[in-house]
Image: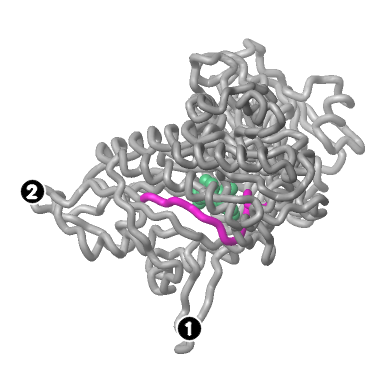
Amino acid sequence: MRTTELFAPTLREVPAEAEVISHQLLLRAGFIRRDAAGIYTYLPLAIRVLKKISQIIREEMDRQGGQELLMPIIQPAELWQESGRWDVYGPELFRLRDRHDREFALGPTHEEIITALVRGEVNSYKQLPLLLYQIQNKYRDERRPRFGLLRGREFIMKDLYSFDRDNEGLQVSYMKMHEAYTRVFRRCGLRFRPVEADSGAIGGSDTHEFMVLADSGEASVLFCENGECEYAANVEKAAPACATADSGEDQKPLGEVLTPGSHTVEEVAEFLRMPPHKIIKTLLYETEKEVVAALVRGDRDVNEIKLSNALTCLRLKLAGPDTVRDVTGAMVGFAGPVNLKGVKIVADPEVAAMVNAVCGANMDDTHLTNVNPVRDFTTDIVCDIRMVRAGEPCPRCGGALLEAKGIEVGQIFKLGDKYSKVLGAFFRDESGQSRPVIMGCYGIGVTRTMAAAIEQNNDKDGIIWPAAIAPYHAVVVPVSTKDESQMAMAEDVYGRLVGAGIEAMFDDRPERAGVKFKDADLIGYPLRITIGTKAITNNQVEIRVRRTGEVMIIPVDELDKYVMELLGRL
Ligand code: ATP
Ligand code: MG
């Protein structure tokens, strides 16, 4: 390809709406243009990258026995009503009507369609296992589409669904996908981690997210400092190490103390001159079913995802001051579990182990002292409901946990019989008995992976593509377009590279060398091959490695060999 023919309109200015570097660079380097919030046109350079990522994904899915198909984007509402998701999916689902007033959705995911396909076609254990996938546009009317391709409303996803006879089969499929994802992201040249993730209130099944580590990531990941221990989890899921040991203190008689104006744990701790971990933090929440008091130690925070899972509720929000007054009789800041009526009490195990603690007295400006669980209050549920923080011990090996930001580029998930049961995908086992197909689902954000690759590989001058997903491997730049011998040599070099199967761009524009070098850096070709005066006098060209700035002078005859070798390392 020649630059004079390439459609890649570059921009000099950084567009104001682009907050993250991948969004800025994709716009500036002429990879994408925006059509509406979270909706983009992918220009020719972007298509080349997306095709490479998709090809890597295809090869790894096929290696594990996956078979590609293509399902419709437009999905009938009836299937979503059957699965029960038409109502729960909420405003994220794009809905539309046809001319006969029939309702449809634009697919945000394809469990319904694929389960309906399998229920019609699979009826015997002999047809299982099956791994089916597609690479296709997905539609989600995200509350806040932002960060360019990282969170779009129309985006490309690879989604694979596994169908097995039983849980053992599912485990095999799950591990195959775990391996495939690891290979995909490694081949794409990304630094990433598979992390344990939350699987939601229903199930308790296994799920892992694949996180590309980058400061712009929206997710927080905790991982063990100890390289051999592979513990890593989304902060939403991270488990605490064992609860604290018994302090051996004797229980003292319950007391009451005035704490005027001390609402927060910090204020109470300072007022009573005691450490925050001796205080019980009581937070009141409302769910669609009830009011709940969540108890964690004063130096901890409630993890609302763990709390929703413990309560198996769909909605959870902090109770407002009126509700707090109604259920405790006091203003916000003085709630406590002692004599708290009509409220479900959920305590973290650390709270259950406290001795002589302080908590709100359910009276304005008053706290209780020497509070002891069991003796002074009862709990409905004791389970882990707190956030784990960096610096705490690893639940697996005791080493310290470190924190990093991550971009979720993929997720693998055990669904079990959740969809097969409601949608009626059953098969007959060896003994002729009817059983639900056991499913898993596995997604990779193709467009998000492209953006994540840029988040991880850039500098002040532009993108630094890993060679495996670069739009072109090398750009050939004649220093002076006016010099006919340089142009002839550049043409020759370009021809040689293309002949050797190297994807080359020939920058044949009549521009100053500086302009062409700047664009080469911005677009991020892994290699730049410069044809200057030496090329003519000594038959030598200069290769510059985008990532390291390393420069080599190479005889033209050996160029393709060097380029091949360098690309293998990038
Ligand atoms: P998130 O938590 O970031 O909203 P998700 O967990 O809802 O994502 P999944 O349903 O697991 O997403 O989808 C599989 C993959 O699709 C994700 O790992 C991600 O790479 C990609 N993806 C999801 N939503 C978007 C989006 N709005 N824009 C681009 N890619 C997305
Ligand atoms: Mg996900």
Q: Which of 272 and 113 is in front in this view?
A: 113
Please report whichever mark, 1 or 2, sits nearer to the chain's N-terminal start: 1
* Range shown magenta: 148-160
Q: Quadrant of residue 545?
A: top right
Instruction: Check disc 1 and report the residue beneath it.
Output: 98
Eye-nearest disc, 1 or 2: 1
Residue drawn at x 54%, y 62% as measured from the top left = 139
**Amino acid type at image mark 1:** Asp
* Residue extending farthest left: 431
Residue closest to the eye, 43 or 333: 43
- In percent of width and height, residue 393 lies at 60, 17
Q: How crowded is mark 2: few (under 14 residues within 10 Å), some or many (20 or more)?
A: few
Left or right of 67? Residue 384 is right
Crowding around mark 1 (Cα neighbors within 10 Å: few <14, some 14 to 19, many 20+) is: few
Residue at horizontal 41%, vertical 59%? 110
Q: Percent position (x, y) of residue 453?
A: 60, 39
State the image quarter where residue 384 is shown. top right
Q: Which residue is drawn at 60% across and 34% down?
A: 526
User: In this figure, what is the number of numbered marks?
Assistant: 2
Is the residue 275 above or below the residue 523 in the image? above
As helix, strand or loop, the secondary structure at mark 2 comes to loop
Question: Residue at left 47%, top 33%?
Answer: 187
Q: In which quarter of the image is the C terminus?
A: top right
Please give left or right for residue 344 compared with residue 549 in the image. Answer: left
Tag 2: residue type?
Ser
Identify residue for label 2. Answer: 431
SS state under label 1: loop
For this rendering, which residue is in front, 468 or 176? 468
